[in-house]
Image: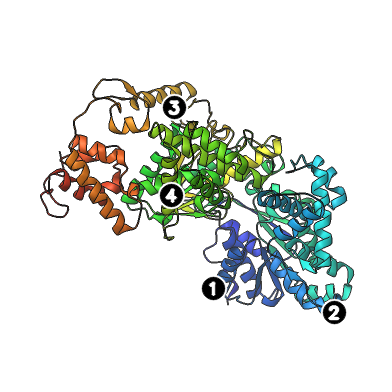
Amino acid sequence: MDPDRVLEGLDPEQCDAARALRGPVCILAGAGTGKTRAITHRIAYAVASGVVTEQQILAVTFTTRAAGEMRGRLRGLGAPRVQARTFHSAALRQLSFFWPQVIGGPEPTLISSKIQVVARAAHSCALQLDRTGLRDIASEIEWAKVTQVRPTDYEKATAKAGRAAPMPAHDVARVYEAYEELRRERNLLDFESILELTAAMLTEHPAIAQRVRDQYRYFVVDEFQDVNPLQKLLLDAWLGDRDDLCVVGDPSQTIYSFAGATPSYLTRFSAGYPNATVVQLVRDYRSTPQVVRVANGVLRHARGPAADHRLELAAQRPDGPDPTYTEYDDEPAEATSVARKIAALIDSGTPAREIAVLFRTNSQSAAYEQALSDAGIPFSVRGATRFFERPEIKQAVHTLRGARHGAEQEPLVTTVRHILAPLGLTEVPPEGREARERWESLAALAQLAEDVAAERPGAAMEDFAAELEARVATEHAPEFEGITLASLHSAKGLEWDAVFLVGLTEGMLPIIYAESAEQIEEERRLCYVGVTRAREYLALSWALARSPGGRKSRKPSRFLDGLRPASPALAGERAGRRRQAAVVQCRVCGTTLTEAAERKLARCLDCPVDYDEELLERLKAWRRESAREQKVPPYVIFTDSTLQALAEHVPTSEAQLSRISGVGAVKLERYGEAVLALCAGKEPGSGGAEGQRDE
C-alpha cells in the first residue's frame, strides 16, 4: 500500500503522530479525539513505509474488546498480521511457549477467580469469611500483587497508600501469604502471576529474552494511564534497552487507581525518555460543543499530576442541544422523570440502544430498572448483575419470602430491616469495596420497603413479599436491546447519542469514602468520563432526599460548581417554583397531599369519592388479560392506583388520559386506545374512540 494513502483523512495532529515512526512517542489523546484511529494508522504507515514488518509489532491494550477492534482496523488498513493483544494474553502466550524449556513439568492450571483459593487460605488462618469478605480479600491480594507488595510488607504499604483494608491489615497479610503458598503447592496460576513469571523469565534467561525481543521490535501501548507497576515491569522486560515504544493515553481518564493503576508512567514519560516525541490530540469528534464545554468545565478546577497534563478539548461537531441540569425532591422522582424523558427521546426518533443512564454505584440501578419497567421501556444492565439477580439480593428475597406469614409486631420497614440485618445491612456502611456494594444493594431493598409503606399505609410483610415476586418476575424477563444502565466505571470506552448522568450529589459523586485529595480527583475524573460518553444529549440530575417526604439535606456535586447556568440565588428561586408547581391538593377537601398513592389519585385516601366500580373491574380484567398475553406482571401495564384514577376521572380523550398520573407517552401510545374504549363502555378494538384525540 502507498504510505501516503494511509494518512488520508487524518487531521494534522493525527498525522504528526503517524509520522513519528521511530523512537519513543507519547500521544496524549483526549476523549473522543480519535486515538484508536491515530495509532492504527501509525502502525499501518510504519508497515507500508518499510520501517518494520507486521510480525515484529506488538500492540497492547487492556480489554479483549479493544484488542479485537484494533485488529479489525488494522486488517482494513492492510496490516492483518500485527499482534494486538491484552497484557495477559501476550504474556500467557510467551510463558506457555517457553514453559517446557524454562521450568518443565506439567503446565500450571490458570484460575480465573481467586475466591476458592482465598477461602482455603482464610480457613487455614482460622478466619471465617462470607463470599463478600472473600471477594474483598481477593481484591486486596490483586492490588498488592500488581503494585509489587509482598505479604510481609502489606501492612506498611496500605498505611502508606491510605488504603482502608476490609479487615485488620495483619489478617489480610496472613491470608495473602497463605494464598500464595497454596497457589504454588497446587501449581495454580492467577493473572498477576502470569505477568510476574513472564517478566522473571525474560530477566533471568537472556537467551529467551533475546528471542522475544527479536520477534517484537515495535511496541504500542494503549490506555497507558491505566498501567500498573506489574504491567510496567513486564513492558520494560519486553523492551530491554530499546526505545521503539509508542504510548497512548489521557491522564484525565485515570479511574482505576484503587486497582493499582497510576498515570505517573504517562505523565512522566518525557522524563524517562527526554528525546520523546509528544503529540496532543484535542480535536473532539464525538461530542457537540455544548457537551465539550461541560467536559472541559469539570476538569477546570482539577488538581494534582494528572491535572497538570489536562487537555482542553476542541469540539469539531455542529451545535447540539444545551445540557440540562435538574434538581429533584427525591430519588424516585428523579428516576421517574428520567424514564419519561427517555420515552420522549425514543418517541422523537432516538434509538433505545443509543441512550444510557450512568451512575456511580451499581446499587443505584434498581430505581431506574423499576422506573423503566413501569414506563414499558426495554433496558439492559452493563458491567453488573441486574439487581434481583445479585447473590445477596437472591438470598434476601428468599429470606423475606420465608417471613411473609410470620406474626408481625412492628411496622413493615422495621421488620424488613431486622430481617436484612443478619445478611449485612448495618447502620454504618462497612469498609471494603465488595462489602460496601453488598450493603448498598441491601439498603436499596430496605428503601423499597419504605416506598411500599409510603404508597400503601398499613402494608404487611405479605404485601411486600408479593411486590418482590412481581418485580423479580419482571427482572428475569429475557434480555433484549434497549436502554443501557451502567456504572461510570463500566461505561469507560463506550459512547451514546444521549446520556443521563444521575445521582450527582455530595456523598455519591464524589463517593462518601473518597477522603484524600487524590481520591477526590479520581472521582472528578469519573465525572469527566461520564460526561464525555455523550455525543449529543446530556442530562445531569440529582435528588435532595432519598425518599418522598424525606429530609432534603443533600447538595449537588461539587463537580457541577460553575457549570449550572443559574446563580445560586436563581437556582434556589427556580427550585422553589418547581416545588410549588409540584404541590398536589386533594380535589375533595383541599388538603396538600404528600403520600404517593394520594398524589396519584389527587385526593386523600379516606375522602369520599364516587367512581365507576364496574369500569374499575373492566379495567382490571383487561389488565389481567394484557399481562397474560405479554407475560409480564399486571403492575407493569398500570398500577392499581392508576386504574382507580382512571375509574374516577373517566377520560374521554387522549389529552385527558395523558393527564392521569402513571400514563406516560409510551403507555399512552401502547394502551391509550384500549383504555379510552373501556371508559366509553366499549370493548377494546371495537372502535368508537376515533375523533377524540384532541380535546
Residues under numbered marks 3 and 4 in contact, where contact means CB atoms less than 8 Å apart: no
Image quarter in which the N terminus is found = bottom right
Kindly report the distance in space between the C-alpha atoms of the residues bearing marks 3 and 4. 26 Å
Residue 173: x and y, percent?
82, 49
Kindly report the distance in space between the C-alpha atoms of the residues bearing marks 3 and 2. 70 Å
Mark closer to the chain start, 2 or 1? 1
Kindly report the distance in space between the C-alpha atoms of the residues bearing marks 1 and 3. 58 Å
Q: Is residue 664 left or right of residue 479?
A: left
Q: Nearer the viewer, mark 3 or mark 2?
A: 3
Residue holding disc 3: 549
For residue 141, above or below residue 107: above
Work out whether residue 390 can be spotted: yes
Residue holding disc 1: 76
Q: Nearer the viewer, mark 2 or mark 1?
A: 2
Residue 150: x and y, percent?
85, 53
Mark closer to the chain start, 1 or 3? 1
